[in-house]
Image (cartoon, grey):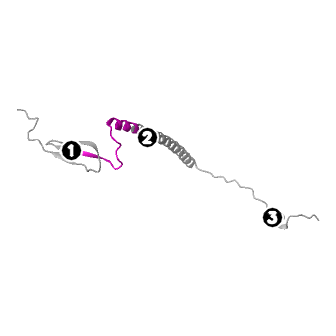
Amino acid sequence: MIRSNLSIVQKIGRPKKEPTQVYVYYTRSRVSKMEEQTAEIQHLRQAQKEMRHSQEEMRQEQGVIKEQLAAIMGMLQRLSGEKAPAENTQTQEQKIAVKSEKDTIVVTSGIETENISSIQTTLPTPLINPYMYP
């Protein structure tokens, strides 16, 4: 009798099963639908890639514009001889409405002020029509 170091359970153990192959059959309409979905996914991925690229370009352009704007503002401040505006300075808009019989004209101008509210003034309507012929 031949002696072995393996236990009886290991000798009698079940043989390993080989992987089985599974075939899945699809109809032609199902295959064409899956192909369309694949093409759409590829198109969306390409569009997403292009969008990310354009967003990166826009960020770079925005950075350049901010640098140019800062340089221009610095030059304007040096030319005008003014100090840089304080942090609590707000740009207020002053509106002057001129009312006439036919239409209303609104003039808007930006004014830098410190915590001053905007003022609205209405000018009186002229009594004489300037378009009248003698």
Residue at position x 57%, y 47% from top? 31
Q: Can you give x and y, in whole percent of width and height, for residue 112 in the image? A: 29, 44
The answer to if 84 sits in the magenta stretch is: yes
Identify the residue under disc 1.
96
Looking at the image, which is closer to me, 84 or 43?
84
Left of 21 or right of it: where is 12?
Answer: right
Left of 61 or right of it: where is 132?
Answer: left
Please state the extent of the stretch shown in magenta in the rendering.
70-95
Quadrant for the N terminus in the image: bottom right
Whether pointer 1 and pointer 2 mark residues with C-beta atoms closer than 8 Å, the reply is no
Which amino acid type is shown beneath numbered disc 2?
Gln
Q: Nearer the viewer, mark 1 or mark 3?
A: 1
Sequence-wise first label, 1 or 2: 2
Residue at position x 35%, y 38% from top? 77
Q: Can you give x and y, in whole percent of width and height, for residue 111 in the image? A: 28, 43
The image shows a total of numbered marks equal to: 3
As helix, strand or loop, the secondary structure at mark 3 comes to loop
As helix, strand or loop, the secondary structure at mark 2 comes to helix
The image quadrant of residue 2 is bottom right
Residue sitting farthest toward the bottom: 8
Q: Which mark is residue 62?
A: 2
Q: Dot 1: within a 10 Å radius of its alpha carbon, few (fewer than 14), some, or many (20 or more) residues?
A: some
Q: Can you give x and y, in whole percent of width and height, for residue 23 in the image? A: 66, 52
Looking at the image, which is closer to me, 101 or 91?
91
The answer to if 68 sits in the magenta stretch is: no
Looking at the image, which is closer to me, 97 or 119?
119
